[in-house]
Amino acid sequence: MADNEKRKKDTDDRVTLKKEIGLLSACAIIIGNIIGSGIFISPKGVLEHAGSVGLSLIVWVLGGGICVLGSMCYAELGVTIPKSGGDYSYVTEIFGGLVGFLLLWSAVLIMYPTTLAVIALTFSNYVLQPAFQNCVPPFIATRLLATICIMFLTWVNCSSVRWATRIQDLFTVAKLGALALIIVVGLVQICRGHYDALRPSVAFEFSGDPSVGEIALAFLQASFAYSGWNFLNYVTEEVVEPRKNLPRAIYISIPLVTMVYTMTNIAYFSSMSPQELLASNAVAVTFGEKLLGMFSWVMPISVALSTFGGINGYLFTSSRLCFSGAREGHLPYLLAMIHLKNCTPIPALLVCCSATILILCIGETHNLINYVSFINYLSYGVTIAGLLYLRKTRPNLHRPIKVSMLIPIAYLLFWAVLLGFSLYSEPVVCGLGMVIMLTGVPVYFLGVHWKNKPKWIYSAVEKVTYVGQKVCYVVFPQEDTSETEPLTSSKAD
């Protein structure tokens, strides 16, 4: 009896990542990461490339449908390989260390810090806009406010997983509330008969002959607004009952976001002509100015709230990717440690924060986003191709969820077309994205593959790790094998 009580106490006192993400918080992470600034500004790009209102609405619906296909594949991978780290963990498990490291290299150093920087700048621009109504906010002011926002949310994430998830829950509700306001006002406009742009005879009047390439670019614009649908897979080990709540959260969140996005675009067109929408750099703000009158200030605040929640979500999930990479030995081991009391990956969060602030100082973040967005969609395709490869090489692997083979095949066909036309339309941008990724090859062979390094290198790494442990008060976590045992035991098959 005493042994059982001791074992229970030891289990309760383990330093592990806490499972504090329930179904509601899981949905909030997905919705909160998808809904950032995209839906407030990207409808212009979709309409511009689609060439008509009707086709742009079809693109928004089908874009959500494609995300549903991808998320169903990720649901299978997430419960079959129940590790935090998302794409990186799955690709490493299926294709080996080099391929996984290249995804990790491009994501941790460039992709996520750059995305965080752009979202933070969007936040600071909208917050400062009322103080600089007749001009663009100063460069220094926007960077300073963005940096303060990043540092504050890093502190929150370092302090408590619960605080971070509660912020995500709160700001997700605020985002949906802002979009609900747009939808309700739009529906009122439609009930009053203001829907000329939505009449079928007008909606499918094309400004020019739509080409396959332009339609592909319209899908790419919509895909940017939907990005983040796979982020729950980055924190699988912190989800309560992931084999139940991971797929449930995906199946609830993606259709909900698709419906909200489509209805929001319909609301835009109920009060704005296509020409007005194309002339606007911030569609939601223009919408508010036209219909909300003295309450038009609600829209800039809504965008600011949306981006603030987006920053929190990106910090939360990208730090877990950094943590997972260090645990696999692909990044310094210090980044795989968590706070002794708070059980948060403080070193990984500090790296994400520092990389983001560095990119904020560089300035030209939008160009970097163009380069690395290609890598983002490349990683989706490689990951889902890995699902098919895993089905073939390990057919007896325990799969709590097993999607039809038609789903990953359909996604990969769409992905190949989209990526192909991206290469054709923007060869320089895509080429530079590949160069960024391939710079990780020599780093992998020098830092990871080369095992017999000089002793002074190991000594220096140990000293840095020791100092980092003392400063951050972190230790290696004990792994919870309750969810990974089926995967481990199946490797003998």
Image (cartoon, grey):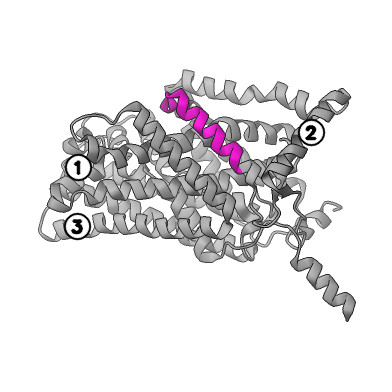
Crowd around label 2: few <14 · some 14–19 · many ≥20 (10 Å): few
Q: Give the range drawn in magenta.
A: 349-368
The residue lying at 44 percent from left, 47 percent from top is 310
- Outermost residue toward the bottom in this view: 1
> Considering depth in this image, is 489 or 208 the residue closer to the camera?
489
Tag of residue 185: 3
Is 483 situated above or below 449?
A: below
Tag of residue 88: none
Tag of residue 286: 1
Mark 3: which amino acid? Val
Crowd around label 3: few <14 · some 14–19 · many ≥20 (10 Å): many
> Considering depth in this image, is 40 or 255 the residue closer to the camera?
40
For mark 2, give the secondary structure.
helix
Mark 2: which amino acid? Lys
> Magenta-highlighted stretch: main secondary structure?
helix
Q: Which of marks 1 and 2 is in front?
A: 2
Q: Quadrant of the N terminus?
A: bottom right
Mark 1: which amino acid? Thr
The residue lying at 18 percent from left, 49 percent from top is 296
Residue linked to disc 2? 463
Place of residue 168 in the rendered image (x, y in percent of width and height, measured from the top left) = 47, 56
Is 109 situated above or below 22?
A: above
How far apart marks 3 and 1 lie (CA) works out to 14 Å
